[in-house]
Image (spheres, rainbow, N blue to C red):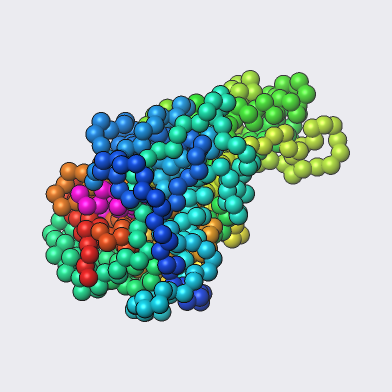
Amino acid sequence: MGREDSHYRPDGGAARGTGRSGSGGATGRVPVPDAHLPRAAEPPPPAPDAVPDRPPPLPWRPPAGSAPVGPNAGRFPTLDGNRPTSAPPSGRAAIPTSPAPGHPPSGGESTIPIPTGVPPLGPPISALPASGGAASPPAPTGAAPLPTPAAPRRRLPVVLGLVLLLVLAGVGVGLTRPGPVAGWLGDDAGPARNSAGATPEPDPADVLAGPDPNAPLPSADGVRAALDPLVGVADLGDRVNVSVADVTSGHTLFAKGADDGTVPASVTKLVTAVTVLAARGPAYRIPTRAVAGAQPGEVVIVGAGDPTVAVDKKGYYPGAARLDDLAAQVRTALGGVAPTRVIVDGSIYSGPVYGPGWDDDIPTGGSGGAVTALTADGARRDPGVGQGAAERFAEPDLAAGRSFARLLGVPTDAVKRGTAPAAAAGGAAPAPGSELGVVQSPPLIRLVDIMISESDNLLAEALARQVALARNQPASFDGAAAAMDAQVAELGLPADEITLSDGSGLSRRNRISPSLLTDLVRLAASPDHPELAGVFGGLPVGGWSGTLGDRYRNAPGTGAGAGTVRAKTGTLTGVHAIAGLVTTADGRLLTFAVLTDKVPGGKETAQPALDRIAAALANCGCS
């Protein structure tokens, strides 16, 4: 089994579904405005002091005085979370900072400065252009017009300068956050200081070069010449579906089976991220409550679907809500009366706890597990374990309830499932159903970041159910899948090209077309949907972070993708996929998706073959 994202078995085991049928696909599109022209390039900033092998500076630098924070703050992580001993790939300068204390390894992410005290987020998408503003000025006189998109389905608004501001602000850059981002993150504006009140660490050096907004558009013929020899290799099997588009203009540059539904594996999480951000909003927090039970001494803990809640300060997810905080609130509310029983209420979820189309060994293999409304530390038995597969509780709700009982001094054999009573007015305090305490998850923008960067399957299923709850659907696999399909259609994406059965991509019944994925990336980069920009923060960076941390390093023909490919990966036995962004050699920003679901061999040969496709785009002038 691979530690990557979905579920990989080198023995080539067959897929055997365990649940109900998928959701089907809603159809229809919502019209969106025509694409805007990009803003003309701004004059370059003064040249910095000479630094060997430093790329051009980022188009926007965070202000002085901010401190690097992140799951791997201040270091360039590898998959094992250790700082590399050599310089970053492609001659890029390493960030000269130290790890921030208190953050467990998370599989690796590149780092950008954010105010100290703000919980961590994922790596920046510094590939987005520097042009900004809600409206772009006319192109310079004599400039060649942008090509017309190949079909109406590619016409999405793409003023990416504004998106750069939103993405960087959304992942916490700077001392203050203008617009809605401060509200999403729940931060108070104020000076950046670390917990000890010391002077913040200096800004890190620039690492990833930003794209050139005036870079030439690759030609379709040039891209075809570069990719045709790579998409037909035997290592990828006989079903390789590909879509490549220019992010700024929407022009289709390469299409092979681009509109065909294909098993996406964990690339499904891109759809989960966009739909939950659209349905709930980036600032939404998932509560975990405690209420008085129907009988004296009963405390009911009510889960609402936050799988990141920790038992105590040693939890797996940074910044998570904590059961020890909730227990302290309960003791205060009870006024010294000792509780005698804990009831676990996870009734907000319904249906099977394992997904339709999941392989038989997923429940015990460490990459998935039972999906319950009350879960602590992603159901991990040991929250101190590193990123990847981990031993999980078979009944996460009862395990969390027993941890809560221990914090309250209640015997663990006095924990059982049940439902909270309806709140009643009057009677002896606390009245049955009255709230005794509540803790809140980090905002969704942070949960999305973790889900994508770590490819967290149980977190993905929890976020899919938030789409269902927001759209008044049952919080089940079927309800979540139907709600996500409907949200895709409402966003104006081609929902007839997607059929979902889960939100993580563990299901082999999922089907997504590559062109829907490239459309989705462009939509998330649209100024009409700033709430979707959070999807970019957690994208792994080739050769640097997350599930791409050990790729684009050693395999022949893949080096050009190091530091220039930012994408979500997907892996099941016989299924290998990748979708995201890549900056060309000329500085043009492209979106791409490559989905394969009939791969004859293992990931040792399939993943390098996929990476050579993305690297060819990174190395492409292709005029």
Residue 129 on image: x %, y %: 41, 59
The residue at 24%/34% (across/down) is 86
Quadrant of the frame with the N terminus: top left
Q: Is residue 161 left or right of residue 568?
A: right
Q: Is residue 279 magenta?
A: no
Residue 443 seen in the current view: yes
The residue at 37%/60% (across/down) is 510
Residue 24 seen in the current view: no
Residue 89 on image: x %, y %: 24, 43
As drawn, the residue found furthest toward the right would be 426
Residue 368 on image: x %, y %: 39, 42
> In the depicted view, which residue is nearer to us: 527 or 354?
527
Q: Is residue 147 above or below residue 347?
A: below
The residue at 58%/45% (across/down) is 176
The residue at 63%/29% (across/down) is 325
Residue 99 on image: x %, y %: 41, 29
Answer with the quarter of the image where residue 192 lies. Answer: top right
> In the depicted view, which residue is nearer to us: 467 or 617?
617
Give the magenta part as a residue range: 559-576
> In the depicted view, which residue is nearer to us: 359 or 212?
212
> In the depicted view, which residue is nearer to us: 450 or 93?
93
Q: Is residue 182 left or right of residue 19?
A: right
